[in-house]
Image: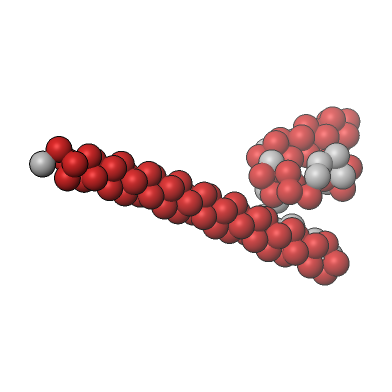
Amino acid sequence: MRSEIGKLKLDDTFEERETLNRNIVNAIELEAREWGISALRYEIKDIEPPNNIQKSMILQAEAERKKRASILASEGDKLAAINIAEAEKLAQVLKAEGTAESLIV
């Protein structure tokens, strides 16, 4: 099991449980065949990484949330600036049209 888990990144370990289970069953089958033992299933239910890795994962997730929040905020600021510019442009056009109409009358 350790050799199979060691082949993956920690993030992939949680996502690839089925593949890990299959690979471990195959490894057990290969080694236990001589003894007449057959492994039908192997299931990884819980992987608990060491505390320092858990802290790193928490910090990474927090950084990712902050990054997404920053991106959303900047996109909102961009849209607000575009809307303000378009409103100012429209106001100038309407003012110019009003001035032109007043000169005609």
Q: What is the tally of numbered marks visible in this picture? A: 0
Query: At which x and y percent is residue 91?
Result: 31, 49
Q: Which residue is at 88% across, 31% downward?
A: 34
Q: What kind of colouring is applied to the model shown?
A: secondary structure
Q: Does residue 46 sit above or below 16 in this rendering?
A: below
Q: Does residue 65 sit above or below 26 in this rendering?
A: below
Q: Which residue is at 58% across, 58% downward?
A: 69
Give the quarter of the figure containing the C terminus. top left
Query: At which x and y percent is residue 17?
Result: 68, 44
* 65 with respect to 3 (left or right): left
* Image quadrant where residue 24 sits: top right
Farthest-out residue, left:
105
Foreground of the two, 104 or 54: 104
Query: At which x and y percent is residue 36?
Result: 81, 33
Residue 22 in sight: yes
* 12 with respect to 84 (left or right): right
Foreground of the two, 44 or 14: 14
Residue 94 in sight: no
Q: Does residue 23 sit above or below 72 in this rendering?
A: above
Foreground of the two, 9 or 46: 9
* Image quadrant where residue 68 sits: bottom right
Q: Which residue is at 68% across, 63% downward?
A: 62
Query: At which x and y percent is residue 67?
Result: 65, 55
Q: Does residue 29 sit above or below 90 in this rendering?
A: above
Foreground of the two, 83 or 35: 83
Q: Which residue is at 21% across, 45% downward?
A: 98
